[in-house]
Every structure is written in C-alpha cells, then in structure tokens.
Image (tube, rainbow, N blue to C red):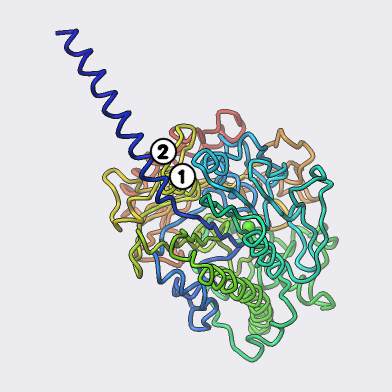
Amino acid sequence: MKLKFTYFVVFVFLLSACNSKKQADDTSEKQPNIIFIMSDDHTTQGLGVYGSRLASLDPTPNLDMIANEGMIFENCFVSNSICTPSRAAIITGQNSQLNGVLDLDGRIEAARQYLPIEMKKLGYQTAIVGKWHLKEEPAAFDYYKVLPGQGSYFDPEFRERGEKPWPKNVVQTQGHSSDKITDITLEWFKKERDPNKPFFLMHHYKAPHDDFENAPRYEDYLADTFIPEPESLYEMGNHGSVATRGKNDSLTRIIGSSVSHRNLIRNQAMNIYVDSTIHRSYREADSIRPEEYVKWTMDEEEKKYASQVYQDYLKKYLRCVKGVDDNIKRLIDYLKEEDLLDDTIIVYTGDQGFMLGEHDYIDKRWMYDESMRMPFFVRYPKKIKAGSRTDAIINNTDFAPTLIEMAGGNVPDYMQGNSFKTILETGEEPEGWQQSTYYRYWMHLAHRHQNPAHFGVRTKDHKLIFFYGKYYVDTTDPNADWDKNNWGNDFTNSTPVAWEFYDLKKDPKEMNNAYNDPAYADVIADLKKELIRLRDDLNETDEKYPHIQKVIDEHWND
Ligand code: CA
C-alpha cells in the first residue's frame, strides 16, 4: 500500500512537472509587455474617471480613455500614505515592517528590488525612468535613468545607468520634468528596447508632487475657471477626534496642515502668499503661545481668504496634472505607432492619494480616504474587459504579485501581497479574497504637516483608525526629523490618543466620527478583531516599540 502511494506521488510529480513545463512554454509565447506608470501624489479627485467634484473640469482626458478601455479599481489603498514607503511596498510586495521602510529615510538596495528581479527571471527586459526615491542604485533594472531623491521640476538632473558609477552618473537635462521623463522613456524604446524580449518598464513622474510647478504652457489653463470646492473646507462637522482636534478643539491650530490660516505651523497660505502680512513665518510658528491653542472658527473674511488660496492651490495642482496627462498621450501614441499598444499591459497609479482641501487639509499621510485611496486602473484588451469597474479591495503590496503572475510567474512566498489577476480577468473576486486592508503612518508630526501617527483598518463599508500619538525612533537614521521630540513646542512630545470610526456607506466624506455611537458597537468590536489579525499576519505589531505598545494596551478598550 505504502509502495503504491509512493508510485502515485512520483506519477503526480512527473505529471505536474510536465504541466508546468508546458505552462512555461505557453506563457513564453504570450508574455505581455508591461508599463507601470506612476505619478506622485496624483489623487483620485484629480482624475475624471473617479467622478469627484473636479471631474466636471475634465482634468485627465487621456488617462480617462486608458481607464475606460480597461478596469478601474474603486478600492485601491496605500498601506502608508507617503512617497518612499509606498514605493518600497510596490517594489517588494511587502508591508513597511517587513521591508524596513517605515519613513522617508528608508532604502531598498538592489538585492531586495524584488519586482524587477522577478521580472528578469521571467525573461523580461527591465527599465525604470523618472522618480525612484528608494535611495540605493536601482541596479536590479537592466536600464535606469532616475531623479536623485525628489528631483527638480525644471531642468532636472538624472542618474543614468552607464559607464560612470552611481551616484556620479549624473546627466543634466533642460525643460520640465514631465516632458523630460517622457522623452527619456521614448528614447529608451527607440535605442535600448530588445524586440526579442517582453519588457517591464516603470515610468514614474515627479508631478504633481508639491510644491507644484507646471510647465509654462499651462499658465493659462483654468485661469478663469472656478474650481469646485469641498464643503468640508469650511465646516469640519463631526470629523476627527480629540487626537486631531484636541480637547474642546484646543489643537485645531496645531494639527494637520491647512488651506486656510487654521494651522499656525503650516498652511498653504504661507506657500502662496509669501508677502502677505497675515500669515506667520515658520519661525513665528515656533513661538506659538498657549492662549492661541483655541478653537478655530472661520469668519466670513477668512472664508474668502481660504477660497482664494484654495483656487490658486488647485489650479497649480491641476496644471501639473495636465502636464502628466498630455505626456501620457505621447507615450500611448508611440505605442500605437509601433503596434505595441494591445500587447502591453498598461497600469496607471499614483504613489498615494492627496488632500485637496477636504476638511481644510493639504498633503497626504492621513488615513482619510482622499489620502489613502490610490488611483489604479489597468488596460490590457487581450484579457481585461473594457469599461469594467470593481470595488474589490486591493493595496499597493498586491501590485508586484499581480504583475508577476500576469507575466507568467508564481507569486514568491516572501511577498505579503496577493495577486488580483483573477479579478482583472473575470471581474469577480476569487473565493476568500481579502475584505479589508491595513494602514500605518509612522512619522508623528513630521515636516510641519503635523499629522499624528496612527494605524487602522478599512473594509468596503467601514473604517477604524487608532491615533496613538507617539514618536518612534528610526534606527536607520537617528537624526531623522521625525525623531526630534519637539519643534520648540511641548505638544509635540505626544498628542492625545483616540479612536475614529466612519460608516463609509452613509458617510463617504467622513464627516461624522461615529466611534461613540452605540449602534456601531458590534461593528467596531469586529473591526478591532480584524485589526489584530492583520497586524499579526503582516508582521505589523508594535513588539519593537514598547512605548507605543503600552499606549495600545492602555487604550484598546476605550
Ligand atoms: Ca507621493
């Protein structure tokens, strides 16, 4: 009996070996090209297909066309809403604690640049152009020409793979970064592409990252147009908690960088109206007096001012978006001319979302939807039905597993994300597909944007956030900004602890923190269980940070 079983095992093994050989042969014939296009801080409100208040301005006709010819994801979320950690999650398929990139100082060296490594194993020619932001040389790619750090909007320098070693391999260019990045990609196609191999190209814009600088040709774009405003720019409602607003709203002038003058430490008025006598300089903000920690209310004059700043801010942002959209057309036109378009999977995303005046906030970092949601759509007419949309939950650790599987490979065990290839190809969630996603922002009160650190869980219908209000120490760089325990203000040592809960079906704009509504007690209890499960499964607990764990233990049942 035992012998028979052994024969059977050997037989099955041989059969599966034959099968996988056959599969490999099949896929090598059909391997698609892949272009992964990513902009920086391009939020869903700034794309026509996501139907926000800005959609009527038609901000992205070319991107909308690609989106409408493929599948649009309505529930794609970032695991940590800031540039470097998001990019690290995308390249490794891992969450922050496993890939080690919790903040802007993190780095991913060549041996852990897993996505291009896996693509190369599958026979792909690999390249990356534009913003990289993971500090180490992107040496796992066959070709790279990337911006150093954030890079410049105008006349950007690049570092290009070639004879000179990193980081001395500097090439100076002239013009606007969105135009240059597209030029470089088109040049790569013409000069470097190996027609005998499928290609995997990461094409990453710097735009529309702040501070927004558009190409001069967009200076008149939207100049005479009124940009629709979010109601929450003027009225906070029951959004937020004691963690974001302080007791009796005593911290509204300290927490969360603003459009209006609300935030004394950093507001958009400072950036735009630098000569204004009303705004405070950064230096002045350091000497904020305790009597100024009082509830902020917008009077009529301030409303007018906030509107003016918002109009100016949004126009600058949308001009940068326009530059990206026009350049996408150049890329698509080239693919059409070369008859490559329909053999190529085209992915578009932004590295996270962005607050465009919602709740009077600017920047990202928050777990609120405008910041946490990523635009994400995929065009590949051979496998993906045009005009499809899905509300399946995916996050940025799922991108690498999906692309590897679409290229004919198997998802490596060391990746934490899940492949959503089935969703792309059938429009259906496979059995057991994830119904929640985890979020963590680490850089407590950094960069004067003044976002308290927090983590949480989001499902299709609900969101639960825990603000623990503490620093952690970055062991990779003890001098990092976010380790400093003050900016000259006592309140930065720690901020109030609180939970927030939003019923996203009833309250998609997150205007009502319903954490204390007894009607949701059971839902919240279930979300807390899910949060524990996710933190355990993803290696995202606070074992290494006992001072944070202490806060979690003390406040878990608040
Ligand atoms: Ca970003």
In this rendering, position of residue 277 left or right of residue 406: right
Q: Residue at x 48, y 61 (%)?
A: 346
Q: Residue furthest bottom?
A: 224
Lower sequence index among marks 2 and 1: 1
The reply to whether callout 2 and callout 1 are in contact (CB within 8 Å) is yes
Which quarter holds ligand 1? Answer: bottom right
Q: Position of residue 516 (x, y in %)?
A: 41, 53
Q: Residue furthest top?
A: 2
- Indicate which disc residue 197 carries: none
Q: Residue at x 79, y 50 (%)?
A: 487
Q: Position of residue 10 (x, y in %)?
A: 26, 18
**Structural distance between the alpha carbons of marks 2 and 1:** 7 Å
Q: What's under tag 1, amino acid-wise?
A: Ile
Residue that mark 2 sits on: 410
Say which of 197 and 327 sits in front.
197
In this rendering, position of residue 379 left or right of residue 145: left
Residue that mark 1 sits on: 404
Kindly state the secondary structure of the residue where label 2 is placed: loop
Q: Is residue 234 above or below residue 452?
A: below
